[in-house]
Structure formats: structure tokens, C-alpha cells
Image (cartoon, grey):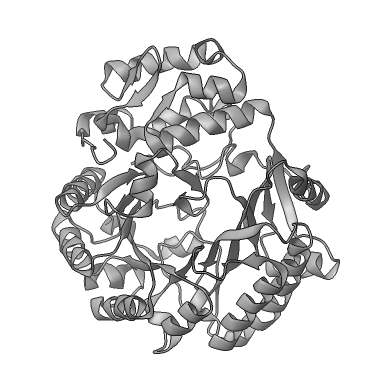
């Protein structure tokens, strides 16, 4: 069932709106500065006392890029000077030590990810030192069974980079492609040939990387259905285990680099929908399973298997098979999910350096979840990962009567049921093939902050 998705243009237009991507619930707009580093430290230490303490997931934000991609909405620092990474890595090492002191060493790291920015901006010696420091303060797996991944820009990779990354413990990678067409690349200032990408993939497979993900973006300037289809054909030839196809959100009033994009060259809303429709059809023909929320995977990939087994989860890096980890985010803007809280680090290098110099975990804001938050997060996560929920499972885990607790939400879902997005049964909710592209709309029904009007933020379009 997970591979079935139907593209219904009329329904998509009917439900077109902006909304959260639900990498967390409550979403980041609900985080507040009343939650500080001391609250985080207290909760983190408490997790060691759980009956079965969760294993750990580590995220490291490496924000530096040597050149700017005009579409980018990430927190980044553009510089050609590689020495700018030195003081940041020194502070990051100190944060690793402080964070490591909060968690018992018998809690192994099942998942690790370097994101950016461009993680391969740093040199090989710095890569080795950063991983060595991590091993000093956390218990990394030494049998290659962990899910240790890194984001790769093929333009920032030397001949020996991939083998070094494999040697220090990485076994998965995500490669930014966005689009292979030269006209589109010129419009967004990211010139990257198929040969550069292919070379990295070939090197990764020779070095023993287990899984490769390729990131694409639709809705970029000068894209057409035909041009993006040409990119998809080249992607299929590379045979990645996973493919992510993101919707470009043009928000130049928020992301200054996007002001350099000519809005007149963006595809129309109708053409964007046609690009998406063609993408889904093409990848389905090539045997990829629609995981949900822009993600596709081969049927034997761990994500597809986890979805079939109802063990798929979602966090700030997207879909994952590690549902029960406490996630520790390190570096500027990184977000942690530890115990029953979310905590986000400070945004700037100056704030980061100051917090670290004072011996403080650099948390600037966060939120402690109450029982209702945890309940709604569970419902949203199950829907967005598995496309169905059983009332009895929610009731057993949260000690509620589902249909009584969510009486108003179920009434709201009746209209969606009439339109063929979902089925409301006696035992649960099932998302139908026409509703899977609109899963964010369905999840939004269970978002109490949106329903109450207290969620004040800027979101991307659901499609």
C-alpha cells in the first residue's frame, strides 16, 4: 500500500495551502525563550534514569559554504577562507564534551549525521579530529551497524575525501543535485555536472557506503516538465537507494539569497504540479516506493521496509528507522529532541562562542511537551509515516478514548473523507492514495496550535 499514490490535480488545488512539515510537533514556531539551557540539562540528565534509556542520535551542524546557491534556505556562512572553520570547530568540540557529560556512556549512538552548510568544507584532518572528539565523549558503534550519514556537495570533494569519510565511520551519504540542466544551474548559481555526481557515487560504492540519497528540487527557475524529466532520467541511471524531491519555496523576504533569483523565471503553479506528477509517475515506473513527504526509496531499502513494518519515524533529518533515539543537535541552530523536550541552539557564531566560553550548552529556546503534545505528536507521526492509525494503539499508549478526545478533529476529517483523501473506519483512519500527497493537510487537523490560531509562522506550500 505504501507505494500507491494518486495525483488528483483538482483535489490538490482545492487543498492548496501552506503548512508545517512536521519534522517536530509542536513545530519550531512554538519554541520559546522561557525554555533555556538549564531546563535542557535537567531533562537530558533525567533520561539516564529511564527504565530503558534510549540510544542516541547525534546531529552536527557545519554551516560553512564556499559559494552560495541562490535557492538555499539553510543556516549558512558563505566564505572562501577555510580558516574561518577553525574557531567554530574548537567551540563545537567543547560543546561535544559538555553534551557528552549529560548522557551515560552505555547509551550507544545508533545514528549520526553531519549537515550544513557544506560538511566537506572542512579539511581531512579536521574531519578526523571531529570524529575522534565525538568518540571520546560518546559511545559510537564500531561494527558499522550504526546509521552514520553525511551531506555531500560533489563540488567540494577531493579524490581521497570519500575513502577518508568511510574510514572514520560514515556509511551513508546524501548528495545535493537539485537539477542537472545547465540553464537551471546557471539561474540558481550551482554549476554541477552529472560527471561530478557520478564520480562521487562511484567512489562511495567502491569505499563500501551502504546507501546513497540524492536530493532534487522542483519549482526552480527555468525548469519545465521536459527539462526536469531529463534530470530524472539521469538520476535513475545512477541508481540511488533513496531520492528526495523537494518543493522550492520562494521566500526572498525571509531568505536574502533568494532575492538573486528572477521570480519571472519560476515555473507557474500549474507547471510545478505537472513536474511533480511526472516525477511521481516516472519514479514509480522505475520501481521506487513513495515513502511520503517528498521521499522515495527502493523497495528493499530500510525506509521502505520500516514503513511496511510500521516502525518508520520522522525527525529533523527526515524519515528514519531510529524511532526511539534521543536526538542531540550540536552547532549553531541545531535542534535536539531529548526526553520530552525540544531545544534549539543559538543562531550566530558570536552567540555560540559566548555560550561555550561560559561553559553553557548553547540553547536559546525550546519547549517541554505536555501530555496533549505527546499524544498529538504520536498521531501526526503515525499518519505521516504509515498513512494509517489504529484507535486502539493510541488509546493503549495514551490512556484516552480516541473518538471522544478527538471528536472535533474527526468531524473536520469527514469533509476530507467525502473528497476521497481518507477513510474513517470504526477501528482507525486510513489515508487513501489520493490523500497521500496531502498528508500535511490531514496532519494539520490534529495540530492544536494551528486550530487555536497560536501557531504564528511562515510555512511552505503543502505541494
The structure residue drawn at horizontal position 58% and vertical position 33%, both measured from the top left corner, is 455
- Which of the pair 90/249 is nearer the observer? 90
Q: Quadrant of the C terminus?
A: top left
Residue 248 visible somewhere in the drawing = no
Answer with the quarter of the image where residue 436 lies.
top left
- 263 relative to 212, above or below: above
The percent position of residue 115, horizontal first and vertical second, equals 52, 66
The percent position of residue 45, horizontal first and vertical second, equals 79, 50
Q: Quadrant of the N terminus?
A: top left
The structure residue drawn at horizontal position 44% and vertical position 62%, both measured from the top left corner, is 72
The structure residue drawn at horizontal position 69% and vertical position 69%, both measured from the top left corner, is 349
Task: Tell me if 411 is positioned left or right of 334 in this view.
Answer: left
- Which of the pair 283/391 is nearer the observer? 391
- Which of the pair 70/30 is nearer the observer? 30
Residue 131 visible somewhere in the drawing = yes
Answer with the quarter of the image where residue 12 lies.
top left
- Which of the pair 434/253 is nearer the observer? 434
Amino acid at each position: 500500500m505504501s507505494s500507491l499514490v494518486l495525483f488528483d490535480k483538482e483535489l490538490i488545488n482545492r487543498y492548496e495551502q501552506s503548512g508545517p512539515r512536521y519534522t517536530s510537533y509542536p513545530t519550531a514556531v512554538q519554541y520559546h525563550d522561557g525554555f533555556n539551557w538549564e531546563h535542557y540539562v535537567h531533562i537530558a540528565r533525567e533520561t539516564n534514569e529511564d527504565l530503558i534509556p534510549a540510544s542516541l542520535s547525534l546531529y552536527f551542524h557545519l554551516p560553512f559554504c564556499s559559494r552560495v546557491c541562490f535557492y538555499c534556505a539553510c543556516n549558512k556562512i558563505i566564505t572562501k577562507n577555510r580558516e574561518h572553520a577553525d574557531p567554530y570547530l574548537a567551540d563545537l568540540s567543547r560543546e561535544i564534551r559538555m553534551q557528552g557529560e549529560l548522557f551515560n556512556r552505555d547509551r550507544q549512538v545508533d545514528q549520526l549525521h553531519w549537515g550544513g552548510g557544506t560538511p566537506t568544507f572542512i579539511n581531512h584532518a579536521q574531519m578526523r579530529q571531529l570524529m575522534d572528539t565525538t568518540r571520546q565523549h560518546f559511545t559510537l558503534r564500531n561494527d558499522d551497524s550504526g546509521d552514520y550519514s553525511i551531506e555531500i556537495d560533489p563540488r567540494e570533494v577531493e579524490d581521497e575525501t570519500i575513502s577518508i569519510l568511510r574510514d572514520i565511520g560514515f556509511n551513508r551519504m546524501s548528495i545535493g543535485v537539485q537539477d542537472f540542466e545547465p540553464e537551471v544551474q546557471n539561474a540558481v548559481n550551482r554549476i554541477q555536472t552529472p560527471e561530478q555526481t557520478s564520480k562521487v557515487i562511484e567512489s562511495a560504492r567502491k569505499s563500501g557506503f551502504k546507501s546513497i540519497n540524492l536530493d532534487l528540487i522542483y519549482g526552480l527557475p527555468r525548469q519545465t516538465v521536459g527539462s526536469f524529466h531529463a534530470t530524472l532520467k539521469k538520476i535513475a541511471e545512477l541508481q540511488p537507494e533513496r531520492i528526495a524531491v523537494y518543493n522550492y519555496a520562494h521566500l526572498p523576504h525571509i531568505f536574502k539569497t533568494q532575492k538573486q533569483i528572477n521570480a519571472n523565471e519560476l515555473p507557474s503553479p500549474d507547471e510545478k504540479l505537472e513536474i511533480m506528477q511526472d516525477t511521481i509517475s516516472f519514479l514509480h515506473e522505475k520501481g521506487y516506493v513513495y515513502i511520503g513527504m517528498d521521499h522515495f526509496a527502493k523497495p528493499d531499502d530500510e525506509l521502505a521496509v520500516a514503513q511496511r513494518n510500521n516502525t518508520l519515524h520522522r525527525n529533523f533529518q527526515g524519515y528514519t528507522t531510529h524511532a526511539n533515539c534521543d536526538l542531540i543537535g550540536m552547532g549553531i541552530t541545531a535542534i535536539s529532541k531529548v526526553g520530552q523536550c525540544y531545544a534549539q541552539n543559538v543562531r550566530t557564531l558570536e552567540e555560540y562562542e559566548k555560550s561555550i566560553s561560559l561553559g553553557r550548552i548553547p540553547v536559546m529556546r525550546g519547549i517541554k511537551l505536555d501530555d496533549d503534545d505527546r499524544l498529538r505528536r504520536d498521531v501526526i507521526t503515525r499518519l505521516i509515516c504509515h498513512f494509517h492509525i489504529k484507535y486502539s494503539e493510541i488509546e493503549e499508549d495514551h490512556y484516552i478514548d480516541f473518538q471522544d478526545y478527538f471528536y472535533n478533529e474527526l468531524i473536520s476529517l469527514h469533509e476530507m473523507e467525502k473528497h476521497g483523501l481518507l477513510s474513517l473506519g470504526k477501528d482507525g483512519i486510513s489515508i487513501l492514495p489520493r490523500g497521500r500527497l496531502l498528508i500535511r493537510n490531514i496532519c494539520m487537523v490534529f495540530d492544536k496550535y494551528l486550530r487555536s490560531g497560536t501557531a504564528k509562522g511562515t510555512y511552505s506550500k503543502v505541494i
